[in-house]
Amino acid sequence: MKLNEDGQKEAVRRLEWWEALTPGEKKLICNLMRMLRGAKHSQIQEVARAAAKWERGIGCFIKVRLINDRKARVVISCRSTSRSLPNVSPNQD
């Protein structure tokens, strides 16, 4: 298995974004992708081509969005120290 620059196993890192989802989110994504895969077998060629194109694009978008969303949640949760800095007031004009 390939190691990334942090020395973590890449496969484990790739699954973290999926494991963090709620069952409802997982079901929605699976149903959406299943619908697109089914549309690829459409009798209408334009629909089949569009479904093949959008399946790849939407799959990539979902993964990137969820991976970045997970990272953003971690960063935001670590920023709590900025509230306790001396001479820093949220009401400064």
Image (cartoon, grey):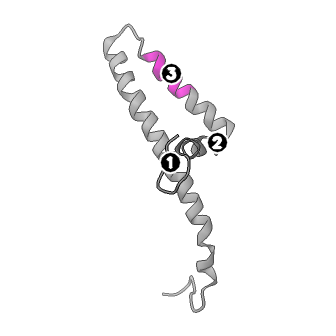
Percent x, y for residue 31?
A: 57, 26
Front in this rendered view, residue 15 or 60:
15
User: Which of labels 2 and 3 is toward the front?
Assistant: 2
Q: CA distance from mark 2 to mark 3?
A: 22 Å
Question: Along the polypeptide, which appears first: circle 2 or circle 3?
Answer: 2
Q: Residue placed at 57% from the left, 45% from the top?
A: 17
Q: Label 3's element?
A: helix
Q: Quadrant of residue 71?
A: bottom right
Mark 1 and mark 3: Cα distance apart in space = 34 Å
If you read the primary sequence from the N terminus, does the residue marked by circle 1 or circle 3 appear first?
1
The magenta-colored residue range is: 31-39
Residue at screen point 56% across, 84% down: 91
Q: Quickly name the residue at label 2.
A: 19
Q: Amino acid at mark 1?
A: Leu
Q: Which residue position is annotated with label 1? A: 3
Task: Return the mark for residue 35.
Answer: 3
Using the image, determine if residue 44 lies above or below residue 55: above
Of discs 2 and 1, which sits in the foreground?
Answer: 1
Prevalent SS, magenta region = helix
Circle nearer the viewer, 1 or 3:
1
Image position of 39 with respect to 16: above or below: above
| Three-letter residue code for mark 3 | Met
User: Left or right of 93: which side holds 30?
Assistant: right
The amino acid on which the numbered mark 2 sits, given as a three-letter code, is Glu
Which residue, as the protein is rendered here, is positioned at the far top? 43
Q: Relative to 44, is 62 on the left or the right?
A: right
Q: Residue at x 55, y 51 (%)?
A: 8
Between the residue at mark 2 and the residue at mark 1, the CA separation in whole angstroms equals 20 Å
Mark 3 neighbour class, 10 Å CA radius: few under 14, some 14 to 19, many 20 or more? few
